[in-house]
Image (cartoon, rainbow, N blue to C red):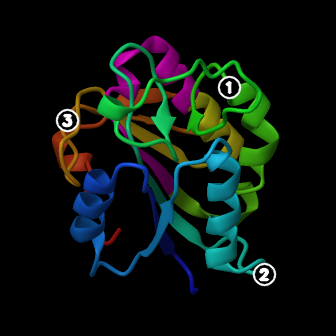
Amino acid sequence: MGASAIVDVIDRGDQFLYRQVYDGVSGYGSTIIGIPPMSNGVGFMISRVIDSLGADQRGTLGVLRIWGHGRTDEPRVYVSYGPPALVTYPPLSSEDNWAAISPANLPQLRGTLMQLTSYFASSARVELRACVIAKFEAGKTMLQDLAKLWNVRVQAPEKLQSSELWTPPVWEATPDGKIRQLGNNEVIEVAARR
């Protein structure tokens, strides 16, 4: 993969979500990685992203979009879980359940997530494409923590999401610890190649 790679990671546990996002992002030059339901989806995702780039391609990842379900009662993005209507969500304090990234498990996932840091390009961004992550102060803090950890901009929505298009407002954290709501003219959609 060359400079400014774009990777779309999609939770395959919900086939409707997977198909909708896959159809929406196909044809725009990204590498699409489907993550099946599993307890260590975050670790599996990191390995698959690195494999897709190639171990010698550090500094080439321009955009990482993580598509999964969020929760309406707390911030988290599921990487490998499935449809909310069919799943009883376990608490993420259990050491064997790393299917999502959340404020509750971020300290334990830090080492796993850091494996991606050197693969990001200097102007890279990560989009957490799951519902209502930035609705919560803990979610905004998580965005700031991830931005610092990966040394990239990290974006997430405040409202429910229903397609491959952002439903504003969208929040962005930067590696210097700042966070702000993006203006609608600043939100980058999948079809925009920047």
Q: Of the residues shown, which amino acid type is indicated by label 1?
A: Asn
Q: Which mark is first along the chain, 3 or 1?
A: 1
Reading the image, the residue beneath label 1 is 105
Q: Secondary structure at mark 2?
A: loop
| Image quarter of the N terminus | bottom right
Q: Does 30 sit above or below residue 181? A: below
Q: Which residues are magenta?
A: 125-143
Left or right position of 139 against 3: left
Q: How many numbered discs? A: 3
Q: Residue furthest right?
A: 111
Reading the image, the residue beneath label 3 is 168
Q: Residues within 10 Å of mark 3 (few under 14, many from 20)?
A: some
Residue 30 tag number: none
Q: Secondary structure at mark 1?
A: loop
**How far apart in space, not on screen, are marks 2 and 1 (Cα)?**
29 Å
**How far apart in space, not on screen, are marks 3 and 2 (Cα)?**
36 Å
Q: Is residue 32 magenta?
A: no
Reading the image, the residue beneath label 2 is 56
Left or right position of 127 against 192: right
Q: Of the residues shown, which amino acid type is indicated by label 2?
A: Asp
Q: CB atoms at circles 1 and 3 under 8 Å apart?
A: no
Disc number lying in front (1 or 3) = 1
Q: CB atoms at circles 3 and 2 under 8 Å apart?
A: no
Left or right position of 184 against 85: left
Q: Of the residues shown, which amino acid type is indicated by label 3?
A: Pro
Residue located 69% across and 69% down the image: 50
Q: Which mark is first along the chain, 2 or 3?
A: 2
Disc number lying in front (2 or 1) = 1
Residue located 29% across and 76% down the image: 26
